[in-house]
Image (cartoon, rainbow, N blue to C red):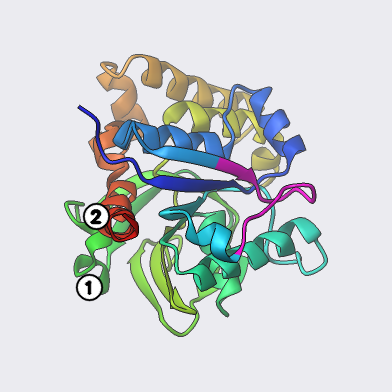
Amino acid sequence: MSGPAPRLLVAEGNPRDRVQNLAAFGGASGSERYRSALNFLYPDAAIEVVEAAEADASLPVGADLAAYDGVVIGGSGLNVPGGDDDPMVQRQITFAKAVFEAGVPFLGSCWGLQLAAAASGGRVATSRRGREIGFARKIAVTREGRGSLFFEGKSNVYDSPAIHYDEVTHLPPGGVVLAANSHCAIQAASINFLGGSFWGMQYHPEFDLLHIAALVKCYAETMVEEGNFADTEAAREFANRLEVLQQDPSREDLAWLLGLDNDVLDPRIRYREIGNWVERMVLPRMIRRG
């Protein structure tokens, strides 16, 4: 039986060279991870991908954007702080503003949250606590978050895949903090701007263990320099354990060693925010559009 078939646009936030570099370590692009998550939840969804960082990409605006039922922006290795003169950054901030103006339901992870905040008048800065790597621990839903449909069916405290160096420090007017942890005061937020609505997370529910492992291997030297791992061998060992657990989820010893529970390991739980966004924002728009 066919299920809901919304038309979704997923923006790739990374430039092509970063995507190719990550692929060399066995990782998928940010847009591929989101396409996989959305296909898991809604196999009949029509999903298109646009390379939002690239100058030769044809980024839809106005009526073209309004033809979609939802727009998603995932992660990127680019940085809003210091990106005032970077066309790859500014191009995507402009695109995020256009999504708001089109009134299309808008979802973002990590870079996506930072773009939405920057486009709507918020502030993004380098985290004072350094890079949050692998997993965001003990994310707590705020009082406002507990009243939001974004967290319907979600535990009030949970872990999720994460990797970021920058974070949103100030939301714009109309922004609401929905979740936080000890590392990051804005782990999830909603933003209303120019008639559009955004739900987003600093963490990455769309990531699986293999993708986290690939990111650690790809950026191991930088992570060692920043003090996240004692040396590159420790980084590789961490990545290898993630890969084994992804391939064999019955390895309770590894799950215990890594401190991972079903909020990370079960995609039906990990993807809950994404599914809630589709159910509560995207599908109603699809129905209205006929």
Q: Residue 276, can we see it?
A: yes
Query: At 34% across and 48% down in the image, what residue appears?
Result: 274
Quick one: label 1 or label 2, which is nearer the N terminus? 1
Q: Quadrant of residue 26?
A: top right
Query: At 50% across and 81% down in the image, what residue appears?
Result: 172
**Amino acid type for the residue under numbered disc 2:** Val
Q: Quadrant of the N terminus?
A: top left
Residue 33 percent location from the top left of the image: 49, 35
Residue 70 percent location from the top left of the image: 43, 54
Q: Residue 143: which numbered mark, if any?
A: 1
Between 269 and 187, the one lying in front of the other is 269
Residue 220 percent location from the top left of the image: 65, 33
**Amino acid type for the residue under numbered disc 1:** Arg
Q: Is 245 rendered above or below residue 289?
A: above
* In the image, farthest residue toward the left: 153
Query: At 58% across and 27% down in the image, what residue appears?
Result: 27
Residue 285 percent location from the top left of the image: 33, 59
Q: Residue 77: which numbered mark, if any?
A: none
Q: Which residue is mark 2?
A: 157
Query: In what element is the residue under mark 2?
Result: strand
Between 9 and 154, the one lying in front of the other is 9
As measured in the structure, the alpha-carbon distance from the residue carrying label 1 to the one carrying label 2 is 12 Å
Between 274 and 281, the one lying in front of the other is 281
Q: Quadrant of residue 141?
A: bottom left
Q: How many marks?
A: 2
Query: At 46% across and 20% down in the image, what residue appears?
Result: 243
- Residue 57 in the magenta stretch? The answer is yes
Q: Residues within 10 Å of mark 2 (few under 14, many from 20)?
A: some
* In the image, farthest residue toward the bottom: 173
- Give the side of residue 16 with respect to residue 186, left or right: right
Q: Which residues are magenta?
A: 49-61
